[in-house]
Amino acid sequence: MAIKLGGGGSGAQINEIRFFVDQGDLFTDPDGAVWLKKGVRTLDTTTYPDAYAINTAVSRTNDYKSTSGGGQFPFVLTAAADSEWALGNYRTSSNQYVYRNITEDTVQTLAWPGTFSGTALLGTAYIKCSAPSGVNSNVANANNYFMAVTTPYTTSPQGTQIFTGYLYGGSTSQAGRLLSSYSSVVLEDTSGNRITPTTRMPIHWDTANRKFYLMATSSGQSCVLYVYDWSSQAWGYTGPNNIIGTANHASQQIDWHTQAGTGVISFQTMSASATHLYVNYRDAYLAFKLRKIPLSGNLSWSSGTDVGFPTGSILLQDDAGNFSTTTVRDGSFAYYKTVGSTEKFLAVNSSGRLYEFSGSALIGETTPDPDAAKTQYQRIK
């Protein structure tokens, strides 16, 4: 069939592709049909509800974008649930962590003080306490938070431990940064055996139910979720207190690697909201996916669902409405907050820049046709 250049959209179906003499990014033809040039994108699904749209990760103009990088990128990224702080550990440095004050848009690379200098940090988290006021002024002054990291325990037999520390508080740009170490505890599985350290060991503290979650994963060869019931402990309730008795025994452990089967080739990291765990993984087609698992369920891999947009890269919208793409580093991804009903996430690119983004329905080709970028159009209304 011959390709017509120019002309109206008479008889054209929505989403049909036709060729025109260049009419700009978006135009309405004499028949009232609206056409979008290939390579141009729009988030306006309200105006064009019948146009084909894909789910993708988008950092909009009003989302947070850091103005500078942070050197090396973190291996695991977490954020404080109700404060403008983000926290990560270094992929290659030993006891280094990356702290960013989002409000001030400042970033610092720091070493964890204490006796374990040179020990790798495998995961990081801000821990929100329920009742610190009048009990622990260090925690109360830091918006009820303290910091926790997972590290290898090198004394035989080897294991995994949590180190905790106090934060700077107040309203200065240092608020949320580590002030001093406090204590540590060696974690055990449900059988009482110490947990062998793996490549990534992200953690989450469920403030409401007072449960601690540890995900241990290594190069796609294993991924186990360990759950600790600390409802009778002061840890995480009033501050970074010592764990008493056998509470360092996991109350539950789930082999996500076995449950997921061949559909998953590697597990990247884990973050969490008040109600869900979010697991970043790569499927059998090498695509980055995000699994959302409810904390109220049995925590099995099958109890979760994929969020529905890839996290290997995100589209960056500028003030003019144009889009560019940046690649997200594996593991450098975390749940941030929910605004209205929209889940917001944070990601770090290869330059160490931090971006806030969400899943959005987007209309338009993601890459222009090299031979017809100026004349190929999709009917969107």
Image: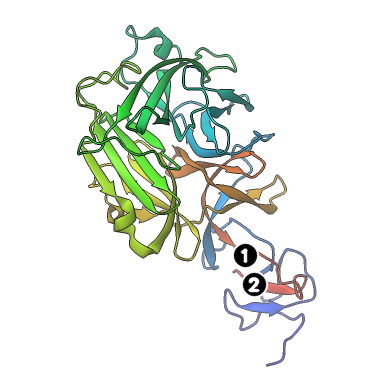
Q: Identify the amino acid type marked 1.
A: Gly
Does residue 253 sit above or below 182 in this rendering?
Answer: below
Q: Residue at x 29, y 56 (%)?
A: 302
Depth check: give the residue in front, 369 or 381: 369
Asked whether 13 or 116 is in front, the reply is 116
Q: Residue furthest front?
A: 156
Determine if residue 9 is in view.
yes
Left or right of 1, for residue 170? left
Q: Amino acid at mark 2?
A: Gln
Please identify the residue farthest to the bottom as the structure is shown.
1
Residue 262 in the figure: left or right of residue 51: left
Residue 33 visible (yes or no): no
Number of numbered markers: 2
Of the numbered discs in the image, which one, if any, rests on residue 220?
Answer: none
Disc 1 + disc 2, Cβ < 8 Å: yes
Q: Secondary structure at mark 1?
A: loop
- Locate residue 181, reporting x and y percent: 44, 16
Give the Cα distance between marks 1 and 2: 8 Å
Q: Where, quadrant-wise, is the N terminus in this rendering?
A: bottom right
Q: Which residue is mark 2?
A: 378
Name the residue beneath numbered marker 1: 364
Disc with the residue nearer the chain's start (1 vs 2): 1
